Image: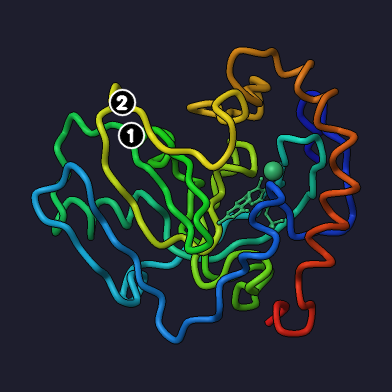
Amino acid sequence: MRPLPPGQRERFDFPRFGTTQFAHRLPDRVAVPTLEVQGRVAKTLTLRDPLAGLPRSEVECDFHCVTGWSRRGLRWGGVRFCDFHDRVLLAQARPDPAAGRVQLRGADGAYTALLLEDLLADDVLIADTLDGEPLSRAHGAPLRLVAPAHYGYKWVKHLMRLEFRRPDEGYRMSAFAFMDHPRARVALEERGRGAPGWLLRRLYRPLIAPTVWWFRRATDVRSATR
Ligand SMILES: Nc1nc2c(c(=O)[nH]1)N[C@H]1C(S)=C(S)[C@@H](COP(=O)(O)O)O[C@H]1N2
Ligand SMILES: [Mo]
């Protein structure tokens, strides 16, 4: 079994989780997923069913939340971001080569960003299945990002927009700036900015149980699971 990264503890369930302002913003199920591509691109796109016709991949990986809980051995299915980039983004949107950062937005209003070079790693997916089943609303239907080397807050659920930016342009984030590291690599314990990972880990740990409770209470379990 893979060892857990620094400061992480294993959980055996997989709770819906996030910053609590999103607990009550679970988006309705949509008939056809839609993904917008904007920012520094030659052409903006509104793609209905954006994964249709693209080669499918699976990624088996562990999930690490910045607050210190991990869930091992999830099997995600979808399209590799690098395949989507080569076949759709480069072919149709034609991003500015200097636009090295991509802002990610979820339909519940969550925002973060990743460097394009991190998104192009070969284990990053735009996922629409989990453990062989269609992604549930609770875990990000219809599409979510899966970025195994990065903390969970970069795995945007209900992904609806990609916006190309230059790295010096800044980006919008859901939380306070100290909570969003530009890269958030788990192996380097990049939990946030301005404060070391070992400190944030200690501040966040007491928040796990109340957050799980809060999300569970907010989620109508029956309508959210499929
Ligand atoms: N759209 C959206 N994406 C999100 C979040 C959110 O609240 N909204 N929370 C993030 C955080 S902090 C974590 S830990 C994971 C939790 O994923 P899960 O709810 O599938 O367990 O989703 C991430 N992606
Ligand atoms: Mo998280």
> Quarter-wise, where is residue 221 in the image?
bottom right
- Is ligand 1 closer than 8 angstroms to the Cβ of mark 2? no
- The amino acid at mark 1 is Arg
Looking at the picture, does residue 161 appear above or below residue 184?
A: below
- The amino acid at mark 2 is Pro
Q: Dividing the image into 4 quarters, which one contains the C terminus?
A: bottom right
Q: Which residue: 18% across, 50% down?
A: 90
Residue 157 picture location, percent across and down: 55, 59
Ligand 2 location (quadrant): top right
Instruction: Return the residue found at the far left.
Output: 42
Which of 18 and 51 lies nearest the eye of the viewer?
Answer: 18
Q: Dividing the image into 4 quarters, which one contains the N terminus?
A: top right
Which type of secondary structure does the marked residue at label 2 adopt? helix
Q: Which residue: 88% across, 57% down?
A: 213
Residue 173 seen in the figure: yes
Which of the labelled discs sits on residue 101, or is there none? Answer: 1
Which of the labelled discs sits on residue 167, or is there none? Answer: 2
